[in-house]
């Protein structure tokens, strides 16, 4: 009976599979593993040597060895490529983590600039807090504002109300004392928004009010928040102060870093329109 029967063909296919597997996953032991498998095949078929099937047996052994060689080289290349991809992914994750930490530091610095530092600067310059009791009141209001910002965030990533966040910020802002009037109009139909969006819009509105107190030389400001379909918001801060030439005067550090860039960072749009003697308009929009 010839060696190449149906059962022999099945056994040969299985042995080729074992050889290829050993060549791919054997690691540094792939060569001994392949030699062991092929050797086992030869020993098992030893009775065929010296018969008409000996040539076929040797050719099958050579074929298994060739399959194993090709599979071993291919497997090594694939594993090296996969390892390189894993290392690249790990490096990307590290860089992403660094970028996120840097972004968070930038956000914290910007928030500190727009809130606590503005209050401390006003106290240091004598513009705020005529006595110890007044300074204590200002510091207490600032602490409450910071606490409200933290407590407003929900676990699901939204806030209780963007209207509430804006109202708390405006109520505790130095403009309430420095200006004669701060007019607010917030659309009650405004939906809950992602925490990041509310944080950025509230911070940008705070900075716009800071600039009015510092530079506008006016006694009134207006803050409005209107609904933009679908589910968006438009926040506008207006004053009728001295203004400036928006065509030739670039936005200052505070306006650029605390209004324009943060709003653009959440996918929104912001612009500042002003003219000498005609006041300033800061408009910020965001839609999901």
Image (spheres, rainbow, N blue to C red):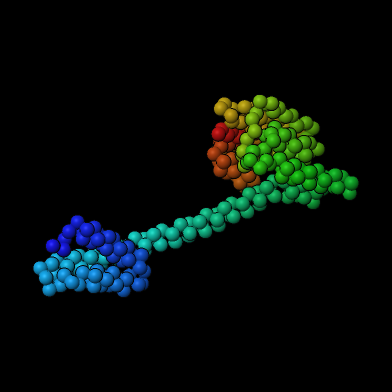
Residue in the image at 63% along x and 54% along y: 105
Work out whether residue 268 can be spotted: yes
| Residue 280, percent from left and from top | 65, 33
Image-based side of 207 in relation to 11, left or right: right
Image-based side of 57 in relation to 29, left or right: left
Q: Check the picture and name the quadrant holding the N terminus.
A: bottom left
Q: Quadrant of residue 134?
A: top right
Question: On screen, 221 above or below 106?
Answer: above
Q: Check the picture and name the quadrant holding the C terminus.
A: top right
Residue in the image at 21% along x and 60% along y: 8
Residue in the image at 23% along x and 61% along y: 12
| Residue 116, percent from left and from top | 74, 49
Judge by depth and name the residue closer to the eye, 120 or 171: 171
| Residue 81, percent from left and from top | 36, 60
| Residue 56, percent from left and from top | 14, 66
Question: On screen, 183 above or below 35?
Answer: above
Q: In which quarter of the image is residue 243?
A: top right
Question: On screen, 287 above or below 9?
Answer: above
Number of numbered discs: 0
Q: In which quarter of the image is residue 188?
A: top right
């Amino acid at each position: 009976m010839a060696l190449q029967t149906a059962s022999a063909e099945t056994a040969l296919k299985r042995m080729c599979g074992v050889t290829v597997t050993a060549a791919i996953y054997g690691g540094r032991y792939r060569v001994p593993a392949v030699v062991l498998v092929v050797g086992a095949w030869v020993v098992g078929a030893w009775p065929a040597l010296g018969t008409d099937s000996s040539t076929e047996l040797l050719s099958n052994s050579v074929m298994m060895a060739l399959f194993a060689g090709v599979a071993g080289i291919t497997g090594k290349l694939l594993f090296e490529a996969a390892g390189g991809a894993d290392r690249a992914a790990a490096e990307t994750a590290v860089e992403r983590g660094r970028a996120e930490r840097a972004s968070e530091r930038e956000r914290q610095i910007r928030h500190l600039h727009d809130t606590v530092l503005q209050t401390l600067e006003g106290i240091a310059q004598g513009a705020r807090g005529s006595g110890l009791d007044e300074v204590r009141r200002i510091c207490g209001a600032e602490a409450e504002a910071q606490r409200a910002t933290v407590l407003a965030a929900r676990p699901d990533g939204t806030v209780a109300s963007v209207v509430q966040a804006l109202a708390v910020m405006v109520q505790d802002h130095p403009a309430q004392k420095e200006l004669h009037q701060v007019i607010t109009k917030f659309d009650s139909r405004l939906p809950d928004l992602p925490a990041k969006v509310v944080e950025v819009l509230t911070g940008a509105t705070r900075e716009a009010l800071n600039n009015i107190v510092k530079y506008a030389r006016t006694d009134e400001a207006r803050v409005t928040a209107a609904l933009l379909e679908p589910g968006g918001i438009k926040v506008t801060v207006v004053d009728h102060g001295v203004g400036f030439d928006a065509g030739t005067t670039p936005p200052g550090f505070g306006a650029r870093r605390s209004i324009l860039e943060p709003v653009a960072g959440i996918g929104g749009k912001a612009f500042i329109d002003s003219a000498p003697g005609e006041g300033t308009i800061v408009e910020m929009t965001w839609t999901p």
